[in-house]
């Protein structure tokens, strides 16, 4: 098939290069550039056909420091590279020099409107024949990248017949996988370089051809790279050019749409109108500003190449190229791997590190001693991610840039240097790296500005249909987005390099978010300063996401913070619709495992105060007070999943040497003994019988100190609470039996469960009794009254009834947190066991159902408390009825035990 170009008379343009070529002072590009304009946010060089051809052929001769990339700007180009587009500003970076020619009737009309002059369209399909003719005359070698092998054969046959003297360096038809893979593209470039192509015609389609040229063009060794799209198909005869009358009327787009409706409908029908609006709104006479305008002098110079100095961190009081800010929370194992990978990046740049530790104990800080120069400190509470960053920044001192890092990252070689180079060349206010998961796959870390349509799209589709339009998803799933550098709205806050002047202008991170959306807010304020947030895929880090735990309360906090963000930056009406979209997502996911209870936490904003938030720990002086002597006995039956966190809370008392901790493993088959034995200072005894009271008695026989605390294996006792309780029991005039104060954690629980525990909290026995907290203690005299534990289920209730009210005490102070069942079924199963245990104590004087009913009635103060009382009574009656039914196994609540793990 003969193409329209093939039927045209072949003309060889002989241009007197010396007569036409002048120098361009601003860029060094040869050719008489009459004007430069901005069309839709894209810089366009206005010139005649002869001038463009002369500029291309002179650069093909070589001698320039960087190659020349030539592109034709039409509405499709504006769509991809214009104002507000994904690739905006990408081609303005000096990786090579660009000549952007005028193409497309709307752009020609706008250029004439701005300049008052007439200009000629310079499409690649119009120029290619003249470039081939001049290459033949001047003996320049030419290569073709893109298109199919079949098309290459057709074009090769035609060129051999029409231009036998043309030097063709080679033909390359790489699959998409090669073009999006850095190593494969580098190998392809080496092959092209070896072939010696001086002019490379790149026909990969927009925006891939421009992005590939920008990334790899210099490596090909070509002097000129022509981003000419479908030219290879025009030359091969697969696509016919529009007849001259249609083209002259500016309707070539309609011709092509009619020829290829399925392939081009999206470009012309959907994307075209939006690009036309950009053209109307964002065009001006003159070039747009360079990306490095306003960059501090400290970042504008070249980064030094000397890698001879020994690796090591700078001190906080020194000025450094980079100050790394790390926030930790029980990340001892993770942060050491991060710092080791970061230390290796210090041979050719100065890096100082500040670690703000939000952990409740010093374990994380103690492991940092192996890294000299690191400034690490305890924040005095769990301040959240934003609060921790602010605390670290306050101690970091001066630096050219600040690098915020999650503790569970590992940096790939040259990651920091590459981020700095990208910041220097682009002038970006913030640069973010490529994140990979542990298996090497790319983590979709790039995000779009939250909106109602995106919230609805994510609510309806989640991670499915990942190729849906960007206005229907906040997450950028497009593989192409992670293959090339470009501007983004925001990215996950695991790793951010922030320019020092931007950090100063933006100010502190907003601590009201605690966790989640704080980076969305911060990067919004960066963009408000007209500074770019830039993605640099050549800088890579591995994110294990080990510190990114999940639970219903954390998931609810994430959604609540999205609503907070919308209210901060949007009008009231918009924020209301956004909230409705967030609630819709929670409602649709409510039946899924792990999502129960989230909807209620989000919908009832009165409950947002119960979501995770910043807390202060007891002052360090109080934590370091000497512990009273005493014993802690923990009966454990198959508690391997929860025992570790219970013992973690006891490390400080154990380390004091005054508190002995005994774990009495009874009938265990899940490795509980190994978990207990892994904690230094813990004494492990084994009891063959699976009996809690047998384990308690065995622990009593092994213990050698008084007083004694009896602790369930799934309860964490704060050090301050343990100290206060032991001190009270050790007092000769103190109580015989005591326990710490406790509080119920109902986060993630169903409405009925929360109502039950609200009513239970109002009962007098909730504060006066020893049962229900999972922990109680006895003095030596108090234990004499007990003698030994009888074989009963409710050991705490039994002990409670041994003592008069004047002999018992609830110790005020930091409470023990009791995790309640999360579902009504789990609560009913627990109550069944409780009431069965209480029935064993029937012959012991004490409270009875009638007395509880009377106390419950007295708690009713209004409709809300009345409803809670009704729910409590219903559960109590159901539990009492169910206790008569025998159960094949111990009714243990797994819903709360696994919560938050």
Image (tube, rainbow, N blue to C red):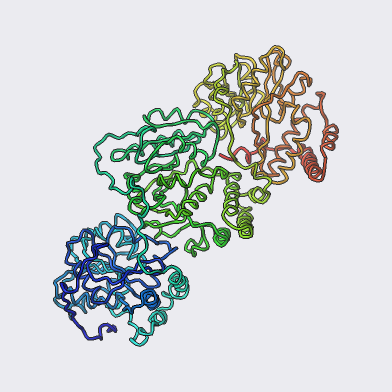
- Which residue corresponds to the image point at 34% horizontal and 63% vertical from the top-left? 176
Q: Quadrant of residue 894?
A: top right
Outermost front residue: 116
What is the number of callouts on the image?
0
Q: Nearer the viewer, residue 666 or 577?
A: 577
Outermost top residue: 732
Image vertical order of residue 360 relative to residue 214, above or below: above
Image vertical order of residue 32 relative to residue 876, above or below: below
Image vertical order of residue 843 relative to residue 559, above or below: above
Residue 731 visible, this angle: yes
Q: Nearer the viewer, residue 828 or 358?
A: 358
Residue 491: x, y in percent? 46, 52
Compared across the picture, whether 689 is left or right of 430 comes to right
- Which residue corresponds to the image point at 52% horizontal and 47% vertical from the top-left? 518
Residue 215: x, y in percent? 31, 58
Which quadrant: the C terminus? top right
Residue 584 visible, this angle: no
Q: Nearer the viewer, residue 786 or 457?
A: 457
Residue 829: x, y in percent? 70, 39
Which quadrant: the N terminus? bottom left
Residue 592: x, y in percent? 60, 52
């Amino acid at each position: 098939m003969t193409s329209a170009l093939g039927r045209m008379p072949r003309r060889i343009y002989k241009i007197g290069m010396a007569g036409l070529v002048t120098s361009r002072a601003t860029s060094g590009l040869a050719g008489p550039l009459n004007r430069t304009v901005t069309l839709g946010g894209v810089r366009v060089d206005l010139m005649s056909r002869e001038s463009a051809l002369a500029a291309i052929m002179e650069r093909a001769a070589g001698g320039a420091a960087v190659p020349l990339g030539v592109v034709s700007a039409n509405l499709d180009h504006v769509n991809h590279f214009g104002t507000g587009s994904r690739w905006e500003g990408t081609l303005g970076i000096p990786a090579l020099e660009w000549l952007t020619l005028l193409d497309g009737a709307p752009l020609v009309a706008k250029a004439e409107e701005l300049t008052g002059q007439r200009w000629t369209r310079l499409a690649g399909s119009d120029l290619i024949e003249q470039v081939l003719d001049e290459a033949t005359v001047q003996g320049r070698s030419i290569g073709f990248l893109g298109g199919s092998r079949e098309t290459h054969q057709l074009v090769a046959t035609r060129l051999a017949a029409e231009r036998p003297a043309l030097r063709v360096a080679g033909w390359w038809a790489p699959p998409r996988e090669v073009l999006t893979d850095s190593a494969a593209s580098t190998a392809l470039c080496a092959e092209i370089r070896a072939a010696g192509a001086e002019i490379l015609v790149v026909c990969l389609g927009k925006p891939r051809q421009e992005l590939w040229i920008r990334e790899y063009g210099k490596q090909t060794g070509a002097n000129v790279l022509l981003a000419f799209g479908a030219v290879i198909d025009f030359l091969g005869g697969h696509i016919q050019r529009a007849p001259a009358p249609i083209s002259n009327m500016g309707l070539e787009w309609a011709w092509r749409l009619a020829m290829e409706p399925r392939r081009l409908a999206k470009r012309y029908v959907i994307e075209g109108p939006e690009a036309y609006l950009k053209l109307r709104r964002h065009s001006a006479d003159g070039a747009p500003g360079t990306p490095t305008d306003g960059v501090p002098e400290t970042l504008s110079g070249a980064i030094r190449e000397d890698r001879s100095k020994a690796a090591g961190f700078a001190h906080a009081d020194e000025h450094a190229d980079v100050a790394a800010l790390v926030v930790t929370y029980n990340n001892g194992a993770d942060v050491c791997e991060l710092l080791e990978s970061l230390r290796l990046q210090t041979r050719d740049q100065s890096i100082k590190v500040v670690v703000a530790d939000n952990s409740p104990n010093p374990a994380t800080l103690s492991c940092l001693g192996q890294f000299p120069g690191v400034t690490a400190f305890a924040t005095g509470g769990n301040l959240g991610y934003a609060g921790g960053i602010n605390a670290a920044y306050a101690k970091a001192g001066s630096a050219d840039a600040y690098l915020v890092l999650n503790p569970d990252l590992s940096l790939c070689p040259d990651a920091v240097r590459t981020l700095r180079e990208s910041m220097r060349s682009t002038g970006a206010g913030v640069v973010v790296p490529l994140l990979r998961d542990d298996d090497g796959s790319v983590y979709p870390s790039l995000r779009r500005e939250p909106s109602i349509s995106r919230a609805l799209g994510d609510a309806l589709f989640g991670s499915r249909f990942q190729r849906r339009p960007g206005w229907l998803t906040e997450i950028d799933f497009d593989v192409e987005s992670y293959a090339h550098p470009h501007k983004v709205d925001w990215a996950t806050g695991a790793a951010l390099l922030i320019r020092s002047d931007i950090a100063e202008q933006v100010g502190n991170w907003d601590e009201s978010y605690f966790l989640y959306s704080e980076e969305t807010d911060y990067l919004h304020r960066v963009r408000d300063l007209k500074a770019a947030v830039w993605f640099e895929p050549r800088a890579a880090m591995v994110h294990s996401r080990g510190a990114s735990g999940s639970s219903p309360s954390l998931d609810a906090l994430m959604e609540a913070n999205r609503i907070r963000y919308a209210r901060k930056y949007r009008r009231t009406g918009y924020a209301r619709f956004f909230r409705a979209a967030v609630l819709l997502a929670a409602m649709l996911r409510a039946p899924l495992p792990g999502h129960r209870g989230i909807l209620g936490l989000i919908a009832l904003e009165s409950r947002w105060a119960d979501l995770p938030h910043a807390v202060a720990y007891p002052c360090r002086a109080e934590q370091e007070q000497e512990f009273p002597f005493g014993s802690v006995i923990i009966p454990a039956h198959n508690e391997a999943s929860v025992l570790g966190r219970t013992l973690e809370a006891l490390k400080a008392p154990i380390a004091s040497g005054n508190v002995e901790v005994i774990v009495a493993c009874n009938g265990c088959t899940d490795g509980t003994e190994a978990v207990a034995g892994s904690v230094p200072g813990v004494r492990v005894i084994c009891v063959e019988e699976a009996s809690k009271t047998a384990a308690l008695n065995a622990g009593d026989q092994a213990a050698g100190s008084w007083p004694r605390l009896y602790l369930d294996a799934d309860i964490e006792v704060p050090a301050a609470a343990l100290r206060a309780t032991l001190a009270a029991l050790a007092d000769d005039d103190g109580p015989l039996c005591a326990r710490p104060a406790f509080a119920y954690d109902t986060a993630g629980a169903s409405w009925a469960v929360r109502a039950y525990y609200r009513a239970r909290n109002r009962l007098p026995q909730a504060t006066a009794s020893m049962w229900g907290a999972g922990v109680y203690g006895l003095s030596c005299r108090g234990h004499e009254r007990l003698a030994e534990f009888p074989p009963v289920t409710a050991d705490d209730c039994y002990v409670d009834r041994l003592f008069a009210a004047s002999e018992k005490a609830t110790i005020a102070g930091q409470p023990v947190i009791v995790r309640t069942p999360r579902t009504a079924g789990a609560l009913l199963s627990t109550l069944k066991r409780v009431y069965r245990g209480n029935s064993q104590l029937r012959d012991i004087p004490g409270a009875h159902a009638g007395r509880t009913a009377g106390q419950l009635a007295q708690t009713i103060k209004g409709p809300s408390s009345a409803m809670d009382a009704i729910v409590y009574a219903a559960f109590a009656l159901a539990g009492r009825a169910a206790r008569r039914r025998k159960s094949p196994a111990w009714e243990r609540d797994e819903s709360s035990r696994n919560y938050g793990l």
